[in-house]
Amino acid sequence: MEVFIINLIAATFRVSTPILLAAIGETYSERAGILNLGIEGIMFFGAFIGFIVADKSGSLWIGLLVAILSGVLAGLLMGLLSVSLGVNQHVSGLGITLLLTGLSLFGFRLVYGGRSTPPAIPSFETIRPLGDVPVLGQISDQYLLTYITFLVIIPLAWFILYRTNFGLNIRAVGENPEAVDAAGVSVYVVRYSALAIGGGLMAAGGAFLSLAQLGAFTHGIIAGRGWVAIAIVIFGNWSPVKVMGGALIFGGTFALQLRLQAMGLQLPIPYETFLALPYIVTIIALVLAGRNASYPAALLKPYKREG
Amino acid sequence: MENVEKPRWRLVKTDNPPFWVKPLIPVLALIGTFILTSVLILLADANPFEAYYYFLFAPLENQVSLLEVLVKSTPLIITGVAVTYAFATGYYNIGAEGQLYAGAIAATGIGMAMHGIPAIVALPLMIVGGFVAGMAWALIPALLKVKLAVDEVVTTLLMNSVMAYIVSAILNGPWRDPNSGWPQSPDIAPSAVFFKLIPRSRLNFGFILAVVLILILWIVMTRTSFGLKMRAVGLGKPAAKFAGIKVERTILTAALISGGIAGIAGVAEVAGIHFHLIGEISPGYGYTGVIIATLGALNAFGVGLAALFFGLVETGAQTLSRALGVPVYLGQVTQATMLLVALGMLLLQRYKFRRM
């Protein structure tokens, strides 16, 4: 039982990492007033680019870096459509997801052909800073990227959004772009920046899956994690710390389901119940938040400068 | 010295684009898409012009592949119509994918029970069953939207994932066909199978269903007061309310019709193509439906045309893949590029060049 719980906690952090990275990326975007439904495709693209670059260059870190860059570009493309052209955000986001998923599958087939066993690369190794300390040692056995996500990216997101001018501008263009414009700050630049940062983080989440967790790229590698991240952002009320909490709850149920399946336990209910549970919990959470969910006021509204 | 500014061409905003702009947009979008995707064709070591012949023209040259275009368009027409009802009302139903599977489950359940029952009974039962199932699955997010103001985009997306697990649970559990190595249900009764329109092709009654749904959409949107109400709500809720329209009821009804029709797409795939339930009934038809509804400008015939074109692209991608070895996913990339380019172009029609 003790081993089970230790493993579960360790797995929770591991499973939460990619979703949390993407959710923080979505937080930046939505705080600036853009719902980026390209998230699912950007994660997929990040997983693909990270894998192929790591495979061809022989360096996982170069793979990760190029994946992040590709995510930044995807974020800028979302900006071109939703910020500069003012296109409906649902449609442009879904279009980007369709485009990047297609591009990744196309590229993967082009490079690796249609072989039945997917190619694999040696993935990132975990680190274990607490060594042989009982219990904590095992829980601390994580990928460096997980540490970076929880200890650097989350505090940094909080700091940027609430303690810097840039963060104030991001939140302001999501609430009242006219006022920001009147203050002499370019709404477009702020929104593009937030989308670029967001895209980079989403792609990093995807690359975590292909470079750390799996060491491979498969068609089902993202499997709706981007949509979960979108729900977690609302669940977490657009606050980085609460979003982290939401990602951990999701990661926990997912890890529990994995453990139970791995143990080969004969349960009276299908294992899919556990898989579906986080989605149902999120829907219930949305209902409970209900009218109190404080959506950024300018979310989904394109900004056009008058005159 | 006179300080006169030289006349220059400028981009200015206009509310009345010249009449020739609108028909030009699809043509320009097509050319733009061709230029962008030819990069990928070159990467695949193929000649773009030759590739586009296989992609867009070869499927139209023989009867077999021409009928296949109609087969591939069928689910796209139906989900495109489904999404149009919702989007026209300003209800962003991204859940057609899950609603399609709800319809597919109902069709399979009813279809498996139809042994010894004539087609004249079986087919209407399956269609109605699929409609009701899609509607039921759409009911939850629709009620949450109108009663509790919960954003429908997120809930419908999440419900898609939940439905994927329900299908998986059914196929690994109660409906698992013991005679198959794959998670799939037993076949539906022969009388529950959609009849073929042309022998030795895959074209079936589902296509007729799709065409009928387009005609109904056209009639509802242009000839009924409900269509008027939907469009009024879609244009602006406060104004619609002021005009005495029951906004919440209109949204709820549109959302349920949308879900029901998406369910019929699932019926058509089970009864017309697969004859049993599998997890891969839809490679994302529900999401493509959103794109088709948008490209079709939420207009019944626009939706039909966009879906036919996407059906051509999917068939052509397979022809091209066989002929020149260009990966079949070029089809999906082309569809997405077409959407994004067209969206950009639609906005351009709001501007015109003027010498000033």
Image (cartoon, rainbow, N blue to C red):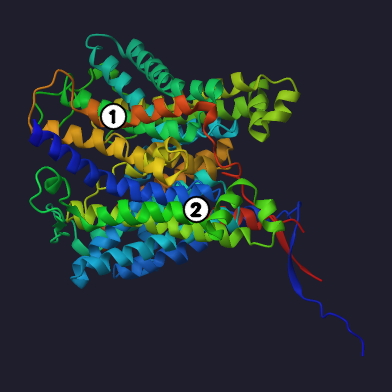
> What is the chain identity of the residue bearing mark 1?
A
Q: Position of residue A122 (x, y in %)?
A: 12, 61
Q: Position of residue B138 (x, y in %)?
A: 44, 24
Q: Name the residue type under label 2.
A: Leu
Question: Is A26 positioned to the left or the right of A18 in the image?
Answer: right
Q: Position of residue A70 (x, y in %)?
A: 37, 63
Assign a secondary structure to mark 2.
helix
User: Which residue is labeled 2 in the image?
Assistant: A161
Q: Counting residues from the N terminus, which is met first, the one under dot 1 or under dot 2?
A: 2
**Point 17% across, 60% down: residue:** A124
Q: Quadrant of residue A190?
A: bottom right
User: Which residue is labeled 1 in the image?
Assistant: A276
The dot on residue B161 is: none
Q: Quadrant of residue B109?
A: top left
- Front residue of B38 and B1: B1
Q: Name the residue type under label 1.
A: Ala
Q: Quadrant of residue A301?
A: top right
Callout in the foreground (1, 2): 2
**Point 36% across, 38% down: residue:** A246
Instruction: Answer whether residue B294 is visible to the viewer in this image.
Output: yes
- Front residue of A45 and A3: A3
